[in-house]
Amino acid sequence: MKFSQFAAVLAFSLLASACGDDASSNAPLDTKTPGGENGQNGSESGKDQASTGVFTKTGTYTVVEPGNLLIIAVDDPTENACVAEGENLVWKTVPFYPPLDTSKYEFRGDTLVIYEIDGGLLDEGNMYVGGTPGKLEGTWLYTGCDVDVESGETECYDDARYREITYTLSNGKITSTLRPHLDRYVADRNNFTNSAFMVQLYSTLSGSNRGVYPSSVLENDSASNSTAIALNGVNIVEQTNTHEVFEMGGKTYEITIKKVAITPTTNGLFMGNGDLEIQLEVSNGASVCKLDHVVRNVDKSLCKDEYAGNIRIDEEMTDAEDHVYALAYRYEKTSYDEFEDCLGSL
């Protein structure tokens, strides 16, 4: 059901760019409370985010028998969002969720499976546990596993451990809840000098390939990193999670990851995306290349024409009431181009 995808989409988008506190004293990580130090929204956005960082959505449901159909109506089918209208950016409320959403459910032992219905056909089924077998009412936890309709095979996803998704059904009311577990996510990604970014950096400095991508500093990639070290003749002199001195091609280089900060946010349609900031430097002893990279959700404070040059605008889409609009959804300010050119001169 599309309502069920609310939490799944949020979890995915959050973890696509998330990071948080690191237990290592070497890592200058900064994780802020959603909405500010006091846990309150600093701007007029994220109407579904609680101050605790828990995301919820509520609605009503009815069950149609036979057929095991579950019909859901979201209490508030709208979201706040920044919309491009002609040459201007406008912060407005747009219809987002369909008035009624129909899914099919079944029980497999102690597991509740809820299938999407798309164009009249069953889509994959999300698997939940925790409730009473054979009884829809109760609280159900998403397992991170889905059932393929055609093959009947089950596929489970590793990133399920980074969020907790539950649905509570009782007396015709349904509540969807998402609790992100950023601590687990960070624990798997806190070694920045063992990341895909380093693979790209070695290749760029050696002249074999050009292109480094800021967010790849969050992608641990031990196998590719080891291969790149051997391929480019890299000799590691010093190394911590956030600092490395290495020799390559007769030169000595130093990289310092000065800041990796994430703020879990709820901004309109993109609840759960993280505001990401990365600062790092690469030096050859004589010159220093600096990267300052900031990516934010577009909330009301950024939904202004003066920021349009730094805002990504999506293709036109149709909302639940057939209104056509284009979302202005991600703000980016980066020194990426200058940084890449600088690397080429080291």
Image (tube, rainbow, N blue to C red):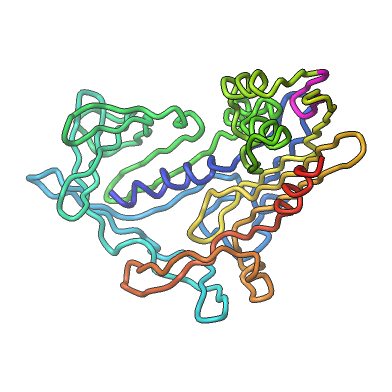
Q: Quadrant of residue 280?
A: top right
Q: Residue at x 50, y 46 (%)?
A: 13
109 lies above or below 279: above
Q: Is residue 15 left or right of residue 308?
A: left
Q: Is residue 273 left or right of residue 192?
A: left
Query: Closer to the camera, 70 or 195?
Result: 195
Q: Quadrant of residue 333?
A: bottom right
Query: Closer to the camera, 155 or 139?
Result: 155
Query: Which quadrant of the figure contains the C terminus?
Result: top right
Residue 37 can be seen in this image = no
| Residue 209 sits inside the magenta stretch | no
Residue 240 can be seen in this image = yes
Where in the figure is residue 302, as x and y percent of width and height? 65, 67
| Residue 238 sits inside the magenta stretch | yes
Q: Overall secondary structure of the magenta stretch?
A: strand
In magenta, the rendered stretch is 237-246
Where in the figure is residue 5, as x and y percent of width and height? 36, 47
227 lies above or below 34: above
Q: Residue at x 25, y 60 (%)?
A: 100
Query: Closer to the camera, 213 or 250?
Result: 250
Q: Residue at x 80, y 23 (%)?
A: 247
Where in the figure is residue 253, as x and y percent of width and height? 83, 30
